[in-house]
Image: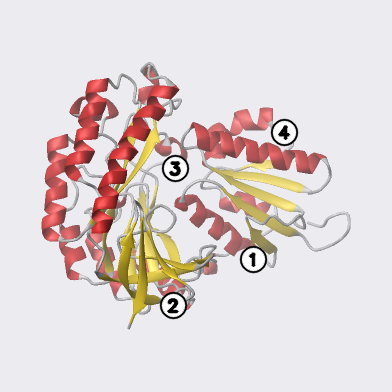
Amino acid sequence: MKTKTLKKDKVNVITLGCSKNLVDSENIITQLRGNDFDVVHDSNDEDANIVVVNTCGFIDLAKEESVNTILQYAAVKKRGEIDKLYVTGCLSERYKNDLEKEIPEVDAYFGTLELPGLLAKFNADYKHELIGERVITTPQHYAYLKISEGCNRTCSFCAIPLMRGKHISQPIEALVKQAENLARHGVKELMLIAQELTYYGLDIYKKRALPELLRALSEVEGIEWIRLHYAYPSKFPMEVFDVMAELPKVCNYLDMPLQHGSDTVLDRMRRHITREDTEHLIRVAREKVPGIAIRTTLLVGFPGETEEEFAEMADFVQEMKFERVGVFQYSHEENTSAHELEDDIDPQTKADRASRLMEIQQEISFAKNEEKVGQTLRVLFDRKEGEFFVGRTEADSPEVDNEVLVPAATNYVRIGDFANVKITEASDYDLYGEVVQ
């Protein structure tokens, strides 16, 4: 494919949404570069003549951002500033027919599993030898490792199975190969991601095989931290906690979206777990892995959520004292079973409830941070920002969790390196300290 100026094509891949989408974009970039294309990621420069937008379709705000981004580049194409515009990802998977009618300026739309079709538009081959050899767009010292695709759960509010399909695990050998390649390029921390982490292995090994995967990844030389994201609480494989306690490389960290603290709402959400079962699971986690950091996400404003049910969730947060909490406001998603219910909680009430939960969590977070003053913690440094070097403990994942700030004027660390830091001060969500030998 050549432009009017006969210059070599340059492709800008734009990523919207979650870390799973980021991995998909990294695979697109890897394949295009393997076919000798000049490819950049999320570039603000205007020298690319082809744009690929990798969309998110998770909730209303994400869909709105995706549509606005497509429209932005459609306008750029109309002005003749780019030659081709392609759209892929979750929004495209779910609303392809509607998008083709509404935004015809896009040259082609592709779903979440249609990378070969996208490559064909570039007259590019899908190079199987590049599987496992992934370009990363994160800082060089950490990367996401997608261990499975899709989800077999039937949560009433969630459209992910509509966009990502059924659960498909990646074989342990393939994941180890990816980890080895990432480690060779300087990656020290792996964030394991999936739509449903604990389901890993059931389809190919006929059992939950996350513990076996963790043991195999822990053998990879160069990898020092392995972090677990997006675990489902129902029928959680308790042996994961044993492995976490046994293997030093597996961070004492678990990202486990719980969604709610009221049994009646959990039932309407089709979560297949009660508050009592959830609290038991958290107690077991803390008994087996002392000091474990549990991150969860909660959903406010689900159809029919009463003040009493919300109060149950607020009490749940207060009682469990999670280390990390994120809050989403319910989004009414077409073709989910919850869409049959009336979206009867007004936007202001949803926003107020989200704020009230985060106020509770802010106090919990500050109290937990204050307990760390005087302790010396191992910190992985991500960047220098203003007057500080900024890093994370094993209790923190990039971009979503707390950070450790060390004054650059009196300390020196290398980005991507670990250092021991004595904590001298705490705020609601961050820690401050000094590097110690």
- Give the numbered dot on residue 110: none
The quarter of the picture where residue 316 lies is: top left
- Image spot of residue 148 (x, y percent): 37, 53
User: In the rendered image, which quarter is residue 431 located in?
Assistant: bottom left
Observer able to see residue 348: yes
From mark 1 to mark 3, how far is it between C-alphas? 25 Å
Alpha-carbon distance for marks 4 and 2? Answer: 54 Å
What residue is disc 1 on? 33
**The disc labelled 2 sits on which kind of residue?**
Asn
Q: Nearer the viewer, residue 28 or 388?
A: 388
Q: Amino acid at mark 4?
A: Pro
Point out the image quarter for the C terminus.
bottom left
Classed neighbour count for the residue bearing mark 2: other residues with Cα under 10 Å, few (<14), some (14–19), many (≥20): few
**Closer mark to the observer between disc 2 and disc 3:** 2
User: Is the residue 391 above or below the residue 78 in the image?
Assistant: below
Which tag, 3 or 4, sits closer to the chain's start?
A: 4
- The N terminus: image quadrant: bottom right
- Distance between mark 4 and mark 1 Cα atoms: 28 Å
* Residue topped by disc 4: 104
Residue wearing tag 2: 411
Q: Secondary structure at mark 1?
A: helix
Label 1: how many residues lie within 10 Å, few (<14), some (14-19) or many (20+)? some
- Earlier along the polypeptide chain: callout 4 or callout 1? 1
* Residue 326 x, y percent position in the rendering: 35, 43
Residue positioned 23% across, 39% down in the render: 317
Disc with the residue nearer the chain's start (2 vs 1): 1
Q: Is residue 229 toward the left or the right of residue 313 in the image?
A: right
Residue at x-position 38% and y-position 28%? 352
Q: Position of residue 184 (x, y in %)?
A: 46, 78
Which residue, given by chain and number where applicable, does mark 3 sit on? 164
